[in-house]
Amino acid sequence: MVELPGGRERRFSARTLWSWWSAYKRGGLEALLPRERSDKGVPREITPELLSAAVAKRQEVPSRSTTTIIDILEREGVVAQGRLRRSTLDRHLELAGSSRRRLKTLGAKRFIRMLFEHPNDLWVGDYHEAPILWVPERQRFRTIHLSAFIDHYSKAVPHGQWYDNEQIATVEDTLKKATLKRGLALRVYVDRGSVYRSADFAFALAHLGSRLVHSKKRCSEGRGTIERWNRTVVEQFEPEVRAARIPDLERINLLFEAWLEERYHRTKHEATGQAPLDRLAQEGFTPRWADPVLVADTFRVRVRRKVHPKTSTVEVGGVHFLVETFLRNRWVTVYYDPHALDDVLVYFRRQRVQRAFVARPNERPQPLPERPTVTPPRFDYLAALRADYDRRIVEAARKISLSDWTAEPGFSLPAFLDLCAQLLGKDLSPYERDELTRAFQTVGPFSETTSRLALEHALKLRGRGLHVSVYSHYLRTFHLAALRELKPNPDKENDPS
């Protein structure tokens, strides 16, 4: 048994070894090299006359295909039907200097390799479809669509998700979640599909300061990064899903997220030599973050609706939203999130009117506002009094109740969210939970005493039904005030009195 340089083991007979030894004795190392055929490079099936005829046909029309040349030669009787193969003639035309590439009629376009210095410089987006959703009633798989964006620098996928369709709502939902998770992209590179050419998609990117770039028609080479990632999904994820026969789209997305974060993002990429997560964590790089409320409002679907003449509501997806009474029986533009119908933005004559919320059944109509009888004063005296009163209440609460703040290990994030829901008197929506969680993790952790006191003051001074950022502002303010009270003051310690 002999171990070869490549690591493989192979067994040779004694006769073979003696023949090699004899050849080495006669001619040295050159005698051990494989011998080339004596007729190498000499046409056997193609005669010089046939090759000359083929070269002449190519020179007549330099862009003429090889199959067309063969068909012409067969019809002229130069060669028998089916005797000449395209690959054989292509090889000899190349040796004769008459290939289409040599004549610069094929493959003249040259592509460059794109290179970026930082993450989020360029995101490449695309759709990929696959029949992986199992339908038990029909005993077959149904096709669903994967919408994803990939960062060209790190090869990390900011967000990818499977949907039922390829509509503007799905691509905007993907880009919205990618922006919230990984920050804003400098450029977004997509093909010329209908969803990517929509005005809403272009407006959303322009509003957030990202440049939209479309690839040229019938040119997919620039999107090779995401095409290669789609192939990775086909090879690594799709076979496992088909084998499991999962009938729930949400379940498929949960498993896809786990595969993306645990397998793909942590595996060394062959193009960069690093795992996507490691390359994404570039030293000195800080993503551009956008306001979550601004992102949620930007990536909304636009529809035209007529306000009901009696109930003063607009209907979107079977949900009715209460709007201003002066809009009754008028056409308005409604911006909504199809994946979270909690509220909509109402525009009338290209101007934003309000953020409308769901109209509750059996809810009493709002009372008519009183008409003003006098001209409003230039200086709002009562509002100034209210502002001074609010400021005094906060200062008094800070001195009296916040000085004894101590950390409470038992007051965890779930307990904090339950306390907020209890004091605000409602179930927290996903974006409200995200805002409060961000405040708890960045400024906190809060104590139960501070949180309760801050929310009670916020409700007393500002009331209910406001945006969650108002209440998170009170939580941050009271918490920081408590920390300042606990921090030792060197001037007071050194004061001899």
Image (spheres, grey):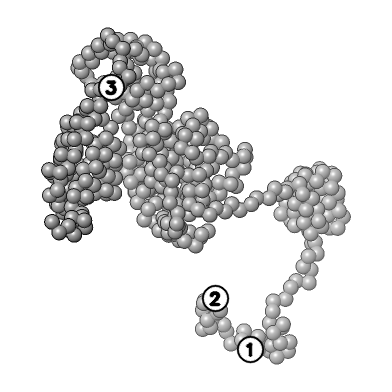
Which amino acid, mark 3?
A: Asp
Sooner in the amino-acid sequence: mark 1 or mark 3? 1
| Label 1 – label 3 distance at C-alpha | 111 Å
* Residue 6 circle label: 2
Residue 326, quarter of picture: top left
Q: Are discs 1 and 3 less than 8 Å apart at CB?
A: no
Q: Estimate the x, y position of residue 22 in percent, counting from the top left.
A: 68, 89
Which amino acid, mark 2?
A: Gly
Residue, far bottom: 25
Which amino acid, mark 1?
A: Trp
- Quick one: quadrant of the C terminus? bottom left
Q: How many discs mark residues in the rendered view?
A: 3
Point 17% across, 42% down: residue: 398
| Element type where label 1 sits in the image | helix
Residue matched to label 1: 18
Sooner in the amino-acid sequence: mark 2 or mark 1? 2
Residue matched to label 3: 380
Q: Estimate the x, y position of residue 378 in percent, counting from the top left.
A: 32, 19
